[in-house]
Amino acid sequence: MKAVEVTRNINATASRVWSVLIDPCALVDADTGIARIDGQFSQGESFVLRADIAARDFKITVANFEPEHRMVWQSGMPLGLFRGVRQFLLRANEVGTCFTMREEFSGLLLPLIWKSMPDLQPSFDQFADALKNLSEKQPSEKKQ
């Protein structure tokens, strides 16, 4: 198994961070590294995501959806040949909210696919920074 992870302390309530995290339009409009999302985030639903870092669409299923606490996305190849599971966690802390995003990759083809994958850490950092910036803005503030 291989994994990529990022954590940020966000000066906003978990409710505010969650509202940004589950808003596909906000995620695409901001500098999150996501070019397109077709669909909505809800338990058991699937959506299509295109990331700036990849030249392809990913069909993703929302495997877990616990408002203001946790969301899990999963995607992969048939027969468990390759699988990615991305988890978003929100925990209250002294600043407001601790946000963690972690993706674990597994499967028989992991050694081959991992070698051809770009370094995902910069895109994880970009997403977390954009989520932090959006969440810390007052709701009435507009993107300039």
Image (spheres, rainbow, N blue to C red):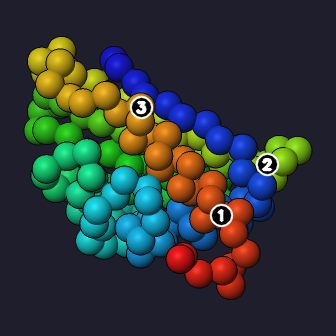
Residue furthest toward the front? Answer: 144
Q: Is label 2 or label 1 in front?
A: 1
Tell me the quadrant of the picture where the N terminus can be found: top left
Instruction: Report x, y in % for residue 43.
Output: 43, 63
Determine which residue is flagged by label 2: 92
- The relative height of residue 29 versus residue 96 in the rendered view (above or below) is below
State the image quarter where residue 67 is shown: bottom right
Q: Mark 1 or mark 2, which is nearer the start of the sequence?
A: 2
Is 25 placed left or right of 116 in the picture? Answer: right
Quadrant of residue 16 in the image? bottom right
Residue at 31% over, 28% down: 119
Q: Amino acid at mark 1?
A: Ser
Crowding at label 2, few (<14), some or many (≥20) Cα neighbours within 10 Å?
A: some
Task: Provide the residue designation for mark 1.
Answer: 135
Res. 82 image quadrant: top left
- As drawn, the residue found furthest toward the top would be 111
Q: Secondary structure at mark 3?
A: helix
Q: Of residues 134 and 20, which is closer to you in this image?
A: 134
Per the model, the C-alpha gap separating discs 2 and 1 is 14 Å
Q: CA distance from mark 3 to mark 1?
A: 21 Å
Pick the residue in front: 138 or 90.
Answer: 138
Q: Residue at x 53, y 62 (%)?
A: 21
Asked whether residue 66 is in view, the answer is no
Above-or-below relation of 115 to 103: above
In the rendering, at what x and y percent does residue 75 appear?
25, 45
For marks 2 and 3 on the same chain, the one whose residue lies earlier in the sequence: 2
